[in-house]
Image: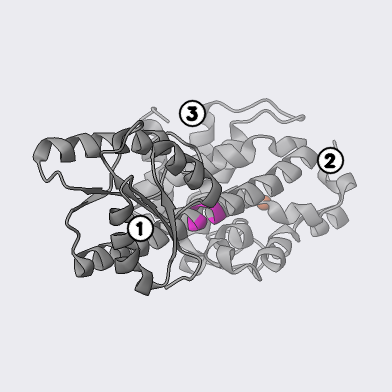
Amino acid sequence: MNESTNILIVDDNAANRDTLESLLVRLGHDLRFAQNGEDALAKAKLHRPDLILLDIHMPGMDGYEVCKNIRSDPVLGDVPIVFTTANDDKKSKLEAINAGADDFITKPIDGMEIRARVKMILRLNRYGKLKQVHNELQDAYEETLNGWVRALDARDSETEHHSNRVTLLTKIFAQRTGIADQDLEDVRRGALLHDIGKIGVSDHILRKPGPLTNEEWVIMRTHPQNAYDMLEPIKYLSKSLDIPYCHHEKWDGTGYPRQLKGDAIPFAARIFAVVDVWDALLSDRPYRKAWTREKAMEYISANSGTHFDPVLTVLFLKMMSEGNI
Ligand SMILES: [Fe+2]
């Protein structure tokens, strides 16, 4: 058991506090005591307990009131609260639940029962904290990825908002193809980061207003390999590599960087290739206006079996002809 775990025992009756202390002391937690509601709130704020054992009937602020106060506190709000009460009636329990109680223990308190309940609640609470840390970590990762994409978008005006649009459409299309739910998040991250390798391409090529020379194209075409080198060591992104690494491969084997052909191209990259070209065609470029949907659909169809996976092309065109995307 974590030695830093601390329990706040709130009871106006000294004999009850002593009883709880004698029953819980052997579990090895730090026990703290409060004699009334105001004292309980002050000590909860000061010590941030892992569990509060709370008497209902106390002079002044009663247990319900203490519980409501704690639940509305932004820091303490989630702390487990167990009511210790002589009231075993339904009405008191309902009122306690409405106030935000997690559990009840009826007085006179049985030693084995309270120790078992305390252990269980602390274990569940530890799991809750782990989940919270996990969620915070996920958010931090997501923010980092978004930061990279913003950094790239800021340099490459042509792709402004392109990353977010293709990410959204890739997710929708991937769902249509029947990709498993647990793989969708990897696909989404891959789409978001598809051109992240362009971070390694210099400004004079990336921002060049006119057409690129052959030498400049050679450098531009290094971006999938750059992405692989950048992302591969990051374990968290290992399942999202397919799109950044393989989105310029073509079905007939004439793409880059590895000239992969047909089914050898990862499925996610084949999905993305259609979406990427579709979005580019529907966007204004300095050298041409955005195409109409009909013209873009004709282009996608004409390149089925050469650039694009023929089965995915049919699915994509069907999805687009439904017109609600
Ligand atoms: Fe690209």
- Please tell me whether residue 312 is drawn above or below residue 258 in the rendered image: above
Work out whether residue 179 or residue 48 is closer to the camera in this orientation and state it: 48
Quarter of the image with the C terminus is top left
Task: Name the residue tied to disc 3.
Answer: 294
Quick check: is the Cβ at mark 3 less than 8 Å away from ligand 1? no
Q: For mark 3, does the 10 Å Cα neighbourhood hold few (<14), some (14 to 19), or many (20 or more) residues?
A: few
1 or 2: tag closer to the N-terminus: 1
- Please tell me whether residue 197 is drawn above or below residue 92 in the rendered image: below
- Please tell me whether residue 150 is drawn above or below residue 312 in the rendered image: above
- Please provide the residue range marked out in magenta: 133-137
Quarter of the image with the N terminus is bottom left
1 or 3: tag closer to the N-terminus: 1
- x, y (%) of residue 129? 45, 57
Task: Look at 33% across and 55% down and name the residue there.
Answer: 17
- x, y (%) of residue 104? 21, 50
Task: Name the residue tied to disc 2.
Answer: 207
3 or 2: tag closer to the N-terminus: 2
Task: Point out which mark residue 180 bears.
Answer: 1
- Please tell me whether residue 66 is drawn above or below residue 28 in the rendered image: above
Label 3 sits on a secondary structure element that is: helix
Q: Is residue 64 magenta?
A: no
Q: Give me the C-alpha separation between circle 1 and circle 2.
A: 38 Å
Q: Is residue 155 left or right of residue 236?
A: right
Quick check: is the Cβ at mark 2 less than 8 Å away from ligand 1? no
Name the residue at the right extreme.
204
Majority secondary structure of magenta residues: helix
Task: Look at 62% across and 42% down and name the residue there.
Answer: 163
